[in-house]
Image (tube, helix red, strand yellow):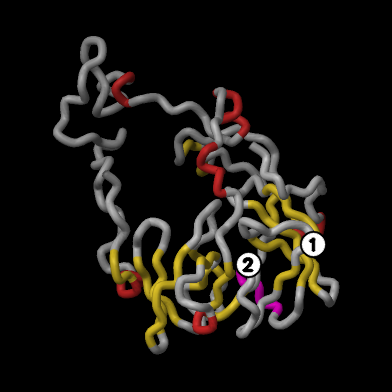
Amino acid sequence: MKPDNLTDRKPEKSLTFKMTKKAGRSHGKISVRHQGGGNKQTYRLVDFKMDKFDIPAKIVSIEKDPNRSSLIALAVYNDGEKRYVLATQNMKAGSEIITSENAFIKEGNRVKIKNIPVGTVISNLEMFPGKGGQMIRSAGSGAALMAIDGKMAQIKLSSGEIRIVDVECYATIGQISNFEHNAIRVGKAGKSRWLNRRPGVRGTAMNPVDHPHGGGEGRQPIGLKHPKTPWGKPALGKKTRKKFKYSNKFIVKRREKRK
């Protein structure tokens, strides 16, 4: 389904770069399975920092970026500079945005957390002041500003996780565009190949020499207490997050488990 606000315009040439294909290989050997082929793509240079302060910008076009799930917007600043930014849900050609510490609370504007009213939906959030947007960047994502307490603010992510961030961090007002992205149906095997995805084979359909789940007569169960990867490592439910990850101290409440 094509979003209504898309603009029929070619990408801005000065903000695009050639991408070379790796096809999941390292030194010619497959290091990541199920990758290869795919249509040619050019990389769009997206400005996650949006660090042109107090200079208004006009949105010229809303475009589809093949490298990300969300739509992107071409912003032309009053001084003539052009930059791609992440498009918010209701952004369209002709909209005006600005990055400022005390900017008006309007969708698309970028404001410091300390000046955003509690309960506002935000996106493209910095984890550290001046670092640029690192969280809440995928299609349809948005987080709620729950509370501001001194130098820290509580943010509730769409997963249910609650984090604290510095109130000096910048965030964009509004939800990221293209929330219907997860409803897209691939429809046929060929479309997966266009998207650089090669076929994946179930472990139970393989021989025992190829996969721990392989073998047996007909449709047999895997014969193991827990499922494994082709290399014998635990799969499904195994925690992979580092025990002493630096950002653990910023997590107030973990995301809710899927039922």
Q: Measure the C-alpha gap from mark 2 to mark 1.
A: 13 Å
Q: Total label count? A: 2
Quadrant assignment, res 236: top left
Residue depicted at x 53% and y 65%: 123
Q: In this image, 232 relative to 68: left or right?
A: left
Is residue 122 among the parts visible in the rendering?
Answer: yes
Closest to the observer: 83 or 254?
254
Report whether 152 appears left or right of 37.
left
Residue placed most toward the observer, 241 or 28: 241
Outermost residue, top direction?
217
Viewer-side residue, 234 vs 11 = 11
Name the quadrant containing residue 170: bottom right
In the picture, the quarter occupied by the N terminus is top right
Residue 160 placement (x, y as % from top left): 35, 59
Question: What span is colored magenta in the figure?
Answer: 48-52
Residue 94 disc label: 1
> Eyeballing the image, is 64 above or below 93?
above
**Mark 2, residue position:** 107
Secondary structure beneath label 1: loop
- Circle 2 sits in a helix, a strand or a loop, which is it? loop
Vertical side of 254 occupied by 197: above or below: above
Q: Position of residue 7 (x, y in %)?
A: 78, 49
- Give the residue type that dot 1 points to: Gly
What residue sits 40% from the left and 73% below the top? 146
Could you tell me if residue 68 is visible in this image? no
Magenta: predominant secondary structure element? loop
Q: Which kind of residue does numbered mark 2 sit on?
A: Glu
Residue located 51% across and 66% down the image: 121
Q: Is residue 243 magenta?
A: no
Asked whether residue 50 is drawn in magenta, I would say: yes
